[in-house]
Image (cartoon, rainbow, N blue to C red):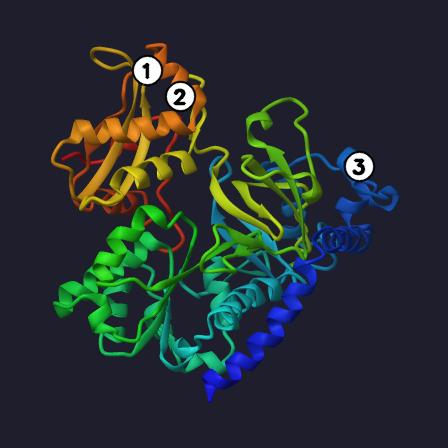
Amino acid sequence: MKSYFAKIYAKRIVKRMERWSKNPIQTQEKVFKHLITEAKNTAFGIDHKFSEIKNYEDYKRNVPIRDYEALKPYVEQILEGKEGVLWKGKPIYFAKTSGTTSGAKYIPITKESMPYHINAAKTALLNYIHKTGDASFVKGKMIFLQGSPIIDTYKNIKTGRLSGIVAHFVPKYLQKNRMPSWEANCIEDWETKVTAIVSETIDKDMTLISGIPSWVQMYFEKLIEKSGKKVGDLFPNFNLFVYGGVNYEPYRQKMENLIGRKVNTIELFPASEGFFAFQDEQNEKGMLLLLDGGIFYEFIPADAFFEKNPTRIALKDVKIGVNYVLILSTNAGLWAYNIGDTVQFTSIKPYRVIVSGRIKHFISAFGEHVIAKEVETALQVAVKGTDIRINEFTVAPQITPQKGLPYHEWFIEFENEPKDLKAFAKQIDEELVNQNSYYKDLIDGKILQTLVITKVVQNGFQNYMKSIGKLGGQNKIPRLSDNRKIVDKLALA
C-alpha cells in the first residue's frame, strides 16, 4: 500500500516541480521580488534601501557580496535579542557550523526557510519514484547517517547541526521505517555511534542508506567486519544510496566493492544555508537547481572572484562549463551571501549543476588554479578499468622540494594500490594537463615537474579527522589546498 500511494503522490509532486523548472527565469524573478518585499522593513533592508530596489541592477548596487564575517554584526544583533534584523521576526533555529576565522558560525533558519529544507529532500525521493517507477525502498528500513539531533539553546534560540535539526521534522509515516534509533543517533563520538548503528541495523531489511560517502564507507566496513558478508548480501533489498557533500565518483568503485553490486544513487546538494539542488535523472549529469525554494541565486566567475569588482550575474546569463562562485539571497535572511561553494552548469534546459569545489580549496601556488573537480576527474580517469581502489586523497603543493622542480603532491590512501606508482602518477598528471591549460603551461615550461604520489597509512585520513575533532557527521576532507597544513599532519605509509 505504501508503494502504491507513494507513486500517486510522486506523480503530483513532479507535475508541480515541472511547472517552475519549465519557467526558470520567471520563477527566480518572482522569488527575488518576494524576498525584497518581505525584508524591506528589516534592519538589513533599511540599511540597504530595499524600498528603493526595483530590479536586479538596483540590488547589485545596494547589496555587496558578503561572507559570514561581514554578516556577523547582524547575527550578533539577533543573538542580543533583537527581532526583524535579517528577516521578519526571529529565526526559529541557528544551524551551527564550523567557521574558519570566526570559530562557530550561526546560520539562521526561519519559519519560512525550514519547510524548504524538508520538502526538497522529500521531492528528490518522490521524483526518483516517479522517474524510475520503483518505490520498493519505502517498504523497508531507511538509514540516515547524520549529526546528533540534540538541540541546545544559545541566546534563547534553539541551536544544532542542520542534520540534527532536520531529524526533528521526519514525517510520522516514515518514523517506523527510519533508522537508527533516537538513542544511537544522539551518540556524539562517531566511532561509538557507528558501532551502535551497526548493531541496530545488521539484521534489518535495509532498503535505503543515506549519508556522506566517506562516513557511509566506514559504516559498510564495520558491517562487513561483523557479519563477514558484503553489504549487498547482508541487505538483499538495499537498492538506493542517497548522498551529498562530496563528489561520489572517487568513492564509487570502493563502495560498489563493499556492497558487492551496483545500486542506484541520488545526489543531493544541501547546506545549512539552504537546499540547492538534487539529481533529478538517473542518466543525466548534474543536479536540478531548485529555483522556487525561497532562494535567489547569483553567480560570479571563479577566476574573477578575487578582483576588486567581480561580475555578478543572475541565472539567465550563466553558461555551461564555467566555474562559478555560488551567491545566495534567502528567506532565512542571507543577502548576497557567499557560501564558498563553486558550481558548473551541465545544462540550462533545465538548469542543472555539479559542485566543482570550494573557492578557498584550490591550488594556485604557481598560478595554475587547479580546482577540486579537475583532480577528482583526473583520478577517476586514471583508475577506470583497473583494480586500483582508493579510500581517500588530498592534494597540496610542494614548493621547496629537497631536489628538482616543485610539484603537486598527492596524498593517497590506497585499498588496492597500483603496481607502478610512478606510471600511475604520470597518467593522473596527463589528465590534469588535458583539463587545465595553466597547469599544462607550467609542466611544459619546466616550472613544475610531474606530480608525486605519497602513500598514507590505512585509516590515516580518519585518524587525522579524529585528531582535529571532526570525525563523522557532515565533516569532509578538503580535496586540495594551497598550503600543507593538512598533509603535514597525515601519517605516511
Asked if residue 27 shows in the view, the reply is yes
Which numbered circle lies on residue 276?
none
Return the x and y of residue 338 as percentages of the image width and height: 59, 40
Dot 1: what SS?
loop
Q: Is residue 235 above or below residue 267?
A: below
Q: CA distance from mark 1 to mark 3?
A: 43 Å
In the picture, measured across the screen, residue 347 lies left or right of residue 411, that is right
**Label 3 sits on residue:** 57
In primary-sequence order, the first of circles 1 and 3 is 3
Q: Are marks 1 and 3 in contact (CB under 8 Å)?
A: no
Q: Disc 3 residue type? A: Glu
Question: Which residue is rendered at x = 71% and y = 50% of the image?
Answer: 86
The residue at the far bottom in this view is 1
Return the x and y of residue 425 as percentages of the image width and height: 23, 29
In primary-sequence order, the first of circles 1 and 2 is 2
Give the camera-side residue of 411 and 229: 229
